[in-house]
Amino acid sequence: MSAPAQVATGNVIGAPIERKEDMTLLSGQAQWVDNMRLPGMVYFAVVRSPFAHARIGSVDVRPALAHADVVAAWSGDDLAEDWNGSLPCAWLPTEDTNAPQHLPLTTDEARYVGDGVAVVVANSRAAAEDAAELVQVEYEQLPAVTDAEDALADGAPLVHGGFGTNRCYTWTLESEGGVDTLFADAAVTVKERYRQNRLIPNAIEPRAVVVNPLPAAGEFTMWSTTQVPHIARILLSGLVGIPEAKLRVVAPDVGGGFGSKLDVYAEEALALAISRRLGRPVKWTETRSEGYTSTIHGRDVWQEIELAATAEGKITAVRVRLVAAMGAYLQLVTTGVPLLGAWLYGGAYDVQGYSFECTTAFTHTTPTDAYRGAGRPEATYAIERAVDALARAVGKDPAEIRRLNFIREFPNTIAAGLTIDSGDYDALLERALENVGYESLRAEQATRRSNGDPKRLGIGFSTYVEMCGLAPSKILGAIRYGAGGWDAATIRCLPTGTVQVLIGTSPHGQGHETTMAQIVADRLGYGVDEIEVLHGDTAVVPLGMDTYGSRSLAVGGVALYFAAERIAEKAKRIAAHRLGVGVDDVEHMRGTFTSAEGSVTLKEIALAAWTAHDLPDGVEPGLEASFVYDPPNFSWPAGAHVAVVEVDTETGLVDLVRYVAVDDVGTVINPTIVDGQVHGGLAQGVSQALYEEAIYDEDGNLLTSSMTSYLVPSAAELPAWELDRIEVPSPTNPLGVKGVGETGAIASPAAVMNAVVDALVADGVTHIDMPATPEKVWRALEEARA
Ligand code: MCN
């Protein structure tokens, strides 16, 4: 295709159209996996280790088999023959990455609380769960390690003894230009250490899987609550030994994922293996508390960040060291999560020198993996808090220090090596300052302090830049990721005037049925309601790379744009033929093809292409086109967020009173959906800052194992978001779009925590780790007072 031209935005792109999918979702007509019932279906439950680390002796399933409703029961050893290799990890960042065996049921040791040891299959879910309790497992409890730094210390209990270490890999990135020299020459340096609290994703819909086998044909259909039906199909076919062409994976309506369903899970493999053994449909549904230990967790990183700067606070170099917890095994992209932030610890700032080192460690905990933002909230948090520390060190206002350091020239190849295609960071910050009323807030802060008001006011910034839209396949290959970053789309103009659109992305709350229809409507002139968007079924849409890394619009949506161009190209030839003019004499505008001889609509052309009675020579019947798009660059959204908090110095309670966000996500397809995406991301990021933390005791028991102890926020805890945008179209793609799905989660933890520290800095508090619980805040104040 020739170089893309920017699309003039019309009234379809950019319109706040209501989500097409909502009526189905809200009226009880959605197809959730757990609602499915198939004739002869059986249910299974997983027997899980109650110990974080234990040698497994005998596993006796006979007591479960004696249960009247039980159909079968197997230990890990019983099923060992069903697997070709391990549950997949798609990303081994270095040649010497330690990748342990990871079977759907463990056979030798349990390595975290929740590690699967046996399965019980019964005629009902309740019977399967009851009978699972009857399985007798001999455990020899062993010492556990739950912290990544502790795991790397000499003498730590080993998660995988065969490696002789808990280290998984060490990965480094260093710019040319002598980072050490820049530090040696710096007038000012700051060094900070931060904790990224471990988080538990809480999608509304727990995980579930149904498999229907067709034994005679050797075919299997799997319905799963997955974000990645295409990836799951490829990897499960390998693991379970089902030819890819015989395995159909369907992600029907999926009720949220936030990265936790970007995985190939043990239970999916078990469902396939069990249905193959029994020749019967089989279902598994997670309980919420089971999900807390058996679905991936997020974050869990120790961060050390150093900034070198001039006396005025101009940053010259950034040096970062991370120790990240992998948990007990590697899930699909566990290893890659810290690397997704590896280029971003310089933030939106113009730095010369950049050094990044990440060491990862196995711990006796639930595996970590991608959770909304994946690596980028961590990077943003570290640089944004460190910039505030630098502002304090050089006596500058946090807004001023950001202005002093912003990248201003685009495209900009940053010291970390990637090229940011576009942005206007000053405009974002200035708009945010205006929207929040910065001057008057600072005045109020000073007044409260001088009046001795126990409720201090804090104002915190996060001027982030994000890398999403994963991704150019060549770059993914260069960093040893196992797949490409392209995506695919097909447009089928049906003879009766409606359109089927097949997208390779797989929405689970993001509104693709609406926004993708808007793109096609804008290009081809159909009504949004005339466009049916199909997704998430490998038999219907065989080609796709699925949904994560805020890629669906910037990659999949752009594939759709180019497919529409192909439709228009072919339609133009047919139109020219019908109008009796040359192709160059026809103008196309949103589905109407006009020449001096008259005009013809795309709907008329679709019918003519189907009857094929009078097509130009060499033109195939039908009006259908596909496009596979591999983006030449990542997508680079940015923004300026400002959090305003009140901190009660008597109780330590933090109240987030205002939150102003100004984002640049390029051209906006649907502002209502974009606002919704930002709302959700902000809720998760604010919650990381103030409420959520997975805590293990020293034996590896998850202490926050339900919503009573793991604090998922409700609307009551959150302010009314004050959102705004500026649109700097991305020059990377013809739609000018950038991703939005993770912006809120990436930006907000830093804004909130900078606000908390800002509130208390006059009291001598310069650091608090997330989550800023009342107890932690109160203790920090007590320490500062002492
Ligand atoms: N959009 C738009 N204009 C833009 C950017 C995006 O109209 N300039 C629209 C898109 O067309 C799409 C939605 O906003 O309908 C999100 O687009 P995008 O940023 O491409 O993100 P993805 O669709 O790839 O979604 C993935 C992203 C991620 S990585 C997580 S995690 C996440 C998220 O989306 N998990 C979610 N949003 C979520 N929303 C819900 N409800 N549930 C989740 O689990």
Image: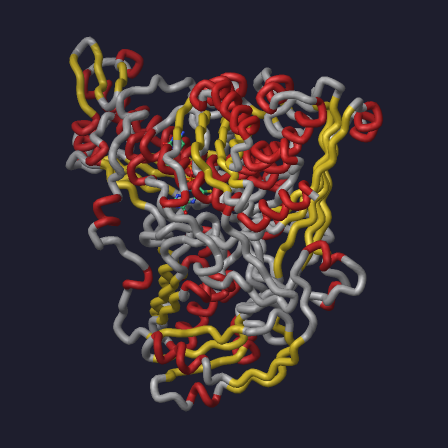
Q: Residue at x 34, y 46 (%)?
A: 535
Choose top left, top right, bottom left or bottom right for residue 216.
bottom left
Choose top left, top right, bottom left or bottom right for residue 163.
bottom right
Looking at the picture, how far across and down is residue 263, in whole percent? 49, 55
For residue 415, side relative to residue 515 (left or right) = right
Instruction: Work out whether residue 219 can be spotted.
Output: no
Q: Nearer the viewer, residue 52 or 176?
A: 52
Picture quarter with ligand 1:
top left
Looking at the picture, how far across and down is residue 335, in whole percent? 62, 51
Tell me the quadrant of the picture where the N terminus can be found. top left
Q: How many marks?
A: 0
Q: Residue at x 67, y 47 (%)?
A: 302
Q: Nearer the viewer, residue 640 or 433?
A: 433
State the residue lying farthest toward the front.
451
Looking at the picture, how far across and down is residue 394, in whole percent? 71, 23
Q: Nearer the viewer, residue 531 or 548?
A: 548
Tell me the quadrant of the picture where the C terminus can be found. top right
Looking at the picture, how far across and down is residue 78, in whole percent? 53, 80
For residue 117, side relative to residue 567 (left or right) = right
Instruction: Work out whether residue 596 can be spotted.
Output: yes
Residue 136 sits above or below residue 12 on the image: below
State the colouring used for the structure image: secondary structure
State the residue lying farthest toward the top.
596
Q: Residue at x 63, y 29 (%)?
A: 388
For residue 692, side relative to residue 676 (left or right) = right
